[in-house]
Amino acid sequence: MEYLGSKTIETDRLILKAQLMEEQKKLWEILMIPEVNRYFLTVPSKFRDKLKDWNIQEKYYEEEMKHAKDNNVFKWIIFLKETGECIGRISCHEATSENSEITDSNIRGVGWIIDPKYQSRGYGTEASKAMIDFMFLECKIAKIITGAAICNPASWKIMEKSGFERKKETKTIQYTFLDEPTEIYCYELTRDKYLLFNKNS
């Protein structure tokens, strides 16, 4: 794996940039929207009340931003190229948050949030494709594993458009802001399959 950090990435309509503190409150406000955080695993559910308190979260983000440009951090803010507005965040993190038994840094997980005002316009698909291209082609990771709630087709359809393979098994996880466990589809995509998928698409 090549540790290149959160290099700026441009698409037709978007710019993905390494995180800065200036945008964190806006991103936190997006995350606090119920239709955004419903299927987002941020922290164990017992900490959800702390997550809702900006005064607590601000201190956490200040510490996190000290390392936002480290070469082993792959987290981006999504900006609209036309207006410069922050509309969400996307990341490619170590897979331990997806499966605690995985310790290989060449296997990653992914996640993203998009402001509901800008959903259903293809921005999530555009940002995820750009990020996945970067991680496979430039950082040369081996595999991405992830999951999406079965009842959240907006998320898993992005994965399938990007070439992810849905596994036969499902699993149940506890999302941060939901009281009951949720059944999810499990997906994976290897570098070789991604290169083949893009060659044939």
Image (cartoon, grey):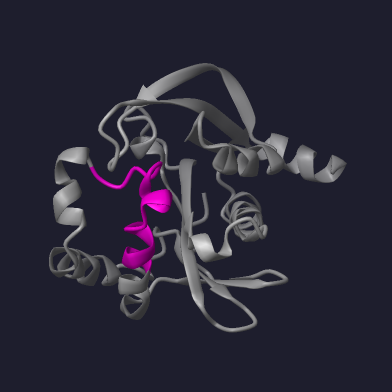
The correct choice, above or below, for 74 with respect to 79 in the image is: above
Looking at the picture, how far across and down is residue 187, in whole percent?
56, 30
Residue at 34% across, 81% down: 22
- Can residue 77 be seen at all in this image of the molecule? no
- Of all residues, the one furthest to the right in this rendering is 200
Residue at 48% across, 53% down: 112
Quadrant in which residue 58 is drawn:
bottom left
Residue at 30% across, 72% down: 25
- Of all residues, the one furthest to the bottom in this rendering is 83
Looking at the picture, how far across and down is residue 63, in whole percent?
20, 68
Residue at 63% across, 61% down: 123
The correct choice, above or below, for 102 with respect to 191 in the image is: above
The correct choice, above or below, for 161 with respect to 137 in the image is: above
Could you tell whether 61 is left or right of 132 in the image?
left
Could you tell whether 31 is left or right of 58 in the image?
right
Along the viewing direction, whichever of 121 and 201 lies nearer the viewer: 121
Q: Which residues are magenta?
A: 27-43
- Image quarter of the C terminus: top right
Along the viewing direction, whichever of 123 and 18 lies nearer the viewer: 123
Along the viewing direction, whichever of 29 and 104 lies nearer the viewer: 29
Total count of labels: 0
Looking at the picture, how far across and down is residue 184, in whole percent?
46, 27
Q: Is residue 32 magenta?
A: yes
The correct choice, above or below, for 25 with respect to 181 in the image is: below
Q: Is residue 18 magenta?
A: no
Quadrant in which residue 18 is drawn:
bottom left
- Can residue 34 be seen at all in this image of the molecule? yes
